[in-house]
Image (spheres, helix red, strand yellow):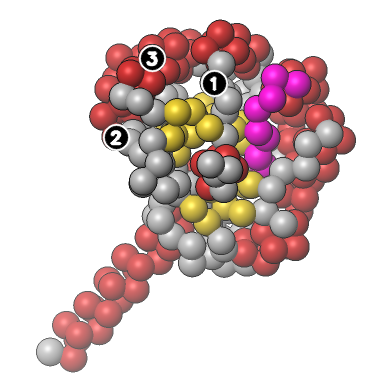
Amino acid sequence: MVGAGVGGAVCAASAFMAWAVRGRSSAVFGPSVWRGDRRRAAVALTFDDGPSESTPRLLEILDRSEVPATFFQCGANVERLPGVARAVRKAGHEIGNHSFSHPFFSFRSAAFMEAELARAQRAIAETTGAVPVLMRAPYGVRWPGLGRAQRRLGLKGVMWTVIGYDWKLTADRILDRVAGNAGNGAIICLHDGRSLEPDPPVGQTLEAVRRLIPVLRGRGLKFETVSQLLCPTN
């Protein structure tokens, strides 16, 4: 019986740690949000891993539909494609911090995580003039010590309400997944890049976004940046 009790405690601790690290609603390792107010008919489109060579095509889609979005950018990609990073800012979109080199934060030191975020913060600010106040950990993985880095850099963590798995699904399946799970206050996670990969294949994402916008608008949902979603002015 004692052994069973110990085993149960170990399992419970493991389950808690798994949720703390990857759970979308977890704020164990730092301030984090995963959705906005359920009472407001608004959603936020977010895009990770950019900028990439395909980001301008995404900007065209968003511009035609007058949709603001939040781009969680990798510092290394910002340095590789500074003109594209500036175009995101010029188009009026929000820019968040997605680390410099897109590593897993699991089993990393607090100093390592802070250095990654700080280097990305500098790259984004120096290139675009925007100083991020939001961050999304690469792969959604948080780890002890991350909260200290967030506090020192003034960053709030952002997870998601629904993730499109758009790095592996077709446009039809991305659309079905996101549209089927996006309601009031939803933060939608998609990708305009693939980690630090040059010229990544994001055509399925672009097609899904083009079709998703009118579907959600047809439900009466308004598109906002994450900051607008979290701190509405009306």
Question: Spatial distance from mark 3 to mark 2, Cα to Cα?
Answer: 15 Å
Over which residues does the magenta segment extend? 90-97
Q: Circle 2 sits on which residue? A: 181
Q: Residue shown at 35%/25% (left/top)?
A: 220
Residue at the farthest left position: 1
Question: Spatial distance from mark 1 to mark 3, Cα to Cα?
Answer: 11 Å
Which comes sooner in the sequence, label 1 or label 3? Answer: 1
Please state the horizontal and vertical placement of residue 134, each as a whole percent of the image: 64, 47
Q: Residues within 10 Å of mark 3 (few under 14, many from 20)?
A: few
Q: Residue shown at 73%/26% (left/top)?
A: 89
Q: Residues within 10 Å of mark 2 (few under 14, many from 20)?
A: some
Q: Residue shown at 56%/8% (left/top)?
A: 64
Does 93 lie within the magenta span?
yes
Which kind of residue does numbered mark 2 sit on?
A: Asn
Please state the horizontal and vertical placement of residue 106, each as a whole percent of the image: 54, 56
Residue at the farthest bottom position: 2
Does dot 3 land on a helix, a strand or a loop?
helix
CB under 8 Å between discs 2 and 1: no
The answer, for residue 102, to whether it is visible in the render is no
Which kind of residue does numbered mark 3 sit on?
A: Pro
Tell which of 90 and 136 is nearer to you: 90
The answer, for residue 125, to whether it is visible in the render is yes
Q: Is residue 52 above or below residue 69?
A: above
Please state the horizontal and vertical placement of residue 150, each as a whole percent of the image: 67, 59
Q: Which mark is residue 96?
A: none
Quadrant of the rendered structure where residue 20 is?
bottom left
Does dot 1 land on a helix, a strand or a loop?
loop
Which comes sooner in the sequence, label 2 or label 1? Answer: 1
In screen coordinates, is 197 left or right of 167?
right
Q: Circle 3 sits on which residue? A: 214
Which kind of residue does numbered mark 1 sit on?
A: Val
Tell which of 232 and 234 is nearer to you: 234
